[in-house]
Image (cartoon, coloured by chain):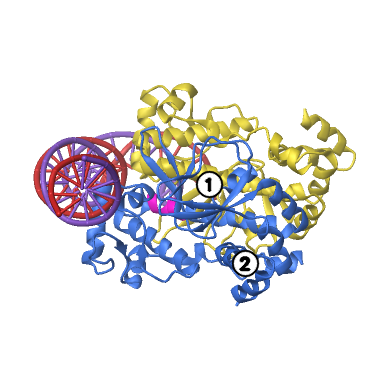
Chain colours: A blue, B yellow, C purple, D red
Amino acid sequence: MWQVNLGASMAGSMKPADAGVLNPLLRKLNSLGFHGEAELRCLVHKVKLRGSTPKGEEIVGADDTPRRLTVLLAGVACLYETLESGERQIYAFYYPGDFCDLHRYVWPEPVAETTVRALTDCSIGIIEHRDLDRAIERHRKLALALWRATMLESSILRERLASLSRRSALERVSHLLCEQLHRRRAIGIESGVIPLTQIDLADAAGLSVVHTNRVLQDLRKLGTVSANSRTIEVVNWERLADIAKFDNRYLTLPALSGWEIRTE
Amino acid sequence: MWQVNLGASMAGSMKPADAGVLNPLLRKLNSLGFHGEAELRCLVHKVKLRGSTPKGEEIVGADDTPRRLTVLLAGVACLYETLESGERQIYAFYYPGDFCDLHRYVWPEPVAETTVRALTDCSIGIIEHRDLDRAIERHRKLALALWRATMLESSILRERLASLSRRSALERVSHLLCEQLHRRRAIGIESGVIPLTQIDLADAAGLSVVHTNRVLQDLRKLGTVSANSRTIEVVNWERLADIAKFDNRYLTLPALSGWEIRTE
DNA sequence: CGTGCTGTTGAGGACGATCAATGACGGTGG
DNA sequence: CCACCGTCATTGATCGTCCTCAACAGCACG
């Protein structure tokens, strides 16, 4: 649908390859309620591509002064912090189309020790804050769309908080897996393979690696996760959602009709 | 400083009593980088006061269609959700000046079962979404300020996540207390009394009430919390911050100079 | 003067952490 | 091609933090 429209219409003004590469961003903006060919083009033309970033590399450091917004275009990344104890706490996973450092656009001064790092090979798009300023100047709805992206991240944080607070390890891991599946499916990835290590999972779920491993084995016995130990692959989504008591509403953007009416 | 300016300048256009009541909101907007007499007046004139809300009452329900933004003007409230297990998970505490339902402005459709409820007697200000739309239309920086408020809430959520994930019960409770102290002090409340019950604390910290009680007793023995069992009063802030390994940066807004330069 | 809410105390048990060692795989360089 | 190394996964054993259940005490309320 929209991919076709945009893909076709942008092909004239941009190399076809680029149009394809930026699809995740277009999809994201669309889902946040920022539509329109002219509107999108205004922002998308400003995106610079950063060469591919290998697994394990830092994408956004804690120290450098922010001057640009980072968009993940391919791969998986995470936002994390190394706590006093030396442990890594993962706050968020990022998938293609996600903005990695909106916080630094809104707060120009570095305010925390958080870092974004590639968990698989990634490709990255860059938008200068100055260009973003201008795009927002022209299309007010863009600020609202990005604000909404922040809100979605908040919503995920709240859900994760509830998990850590009140759910068992089995539920926690299942819930985390469900969320990843859901988000990946939302951007067109139907496979049940989740490209994270057990260590990543543990650092996000607030469990020890050993216990995470045991929980995964339980999930295998329950027939929800593939027996192959090298990759985490969910084979029975329904049962997993059942175990996790997963309710996807917190991830599901409403139709946004109300918003349109108000600002249009 | 700014209170004087505004208090004086608004006195002409609004009942003196009202000007005082709205001070927390003015202070908050100021701290978010939204200054200027004209700018503030444009929004503040639209605030309607809702009669005082008694302790225990619902401020923002999960069901009703949102049409207005709620600002806490006095008292303490919390955002919470009742989980499948029947337990209450508190996601956020709100103090005077805080916006209670920005998420509903950004997402007009209800998207989660979260509720805002008064933990003490509160007084509430209301701004119609329509009026807010217009104010944002006129002063673009207002949207950015509110976006920043969302970001601050996010930042608190991340910190809380780290607490639940990796810190001991003693650290968790201490950290939570430190945060409340810090936020209260930021709005001019210097007292060490924290108007929450042990139940509130437990539901926010992800601990059982029984264990929370025991932790508080430990804190009393350590001389950080007053021996009076009816109210929670911190008597030794430094030692508490020490126990919690509290680093207030995640709560501290930077000077915002960068932002000003870009949009002014 | 009961009734309800909050705080307190004790006992027992479960869930998950920690420590330690081993296995499996992939990549690298000789 | 093989030896080596680093990363990730796995297993067993032990320990401790925190949960659960249950009962009771104090205070505020009508």
Residue B221 colored in magenta in the image = no
Image quarter where the C terminus of chain A lies is bottom right
Image quarter where the N terminus of chain A lies is bottom right
* Total marks placed: 2
Task: Please report the bounds of the magenta region as a residue range.
Answer: A159-164
SS class of the residue under badge 1?
strand
Q: Would residue B58 be visible to someone looking at this image?
A: no
Kind of residue at disc 2: Asn
Looking at the picture, do discs 2 and 1 lie on one chain?
Answer: no
Q: Nearer the viewer, mark 2 or mark 1?
A: 2
- Looking at this view, is B198 or B204 the one in front? B204
Name the spot of residue B234 as percent of width and height, x first: 48, 27
Name the spot of residue D25 as percent of width and height, x first: 34, 36
**Dot 1 surroundings within 10 Å: few (below 14), some, or many (20 or more)?**
some
Predominant secondary structure, magenta span: helix
Q: CA distance from mark 2 to mark 1?
A: 30 Å
Task: From the image, tell me which residue sits under label 1.
Answer: B92
Instruction: Answer left or right for B29 relative to B209.
Output: right
Kind of residue at disc 1: Ala
Q: Chain of mark 2?
A: A
Please tell me the numbered disc located at residue A30: 2
Please tell me the numbered disc located at residue A218: none
Tag 2 and tag 1, C-beta contact below 8 Å: no
Res B105 → quadrant: bottom right
Residue farthest toward the right in the current orientation of the protein: B12
Name the spot of residue A121 as percent of width and height, x first: 42, 54
Name the spot of residue B209 as percent of width and height, x first: 37, 43
Instruction: Answer left or right for B236 relative to A144.
Output: left
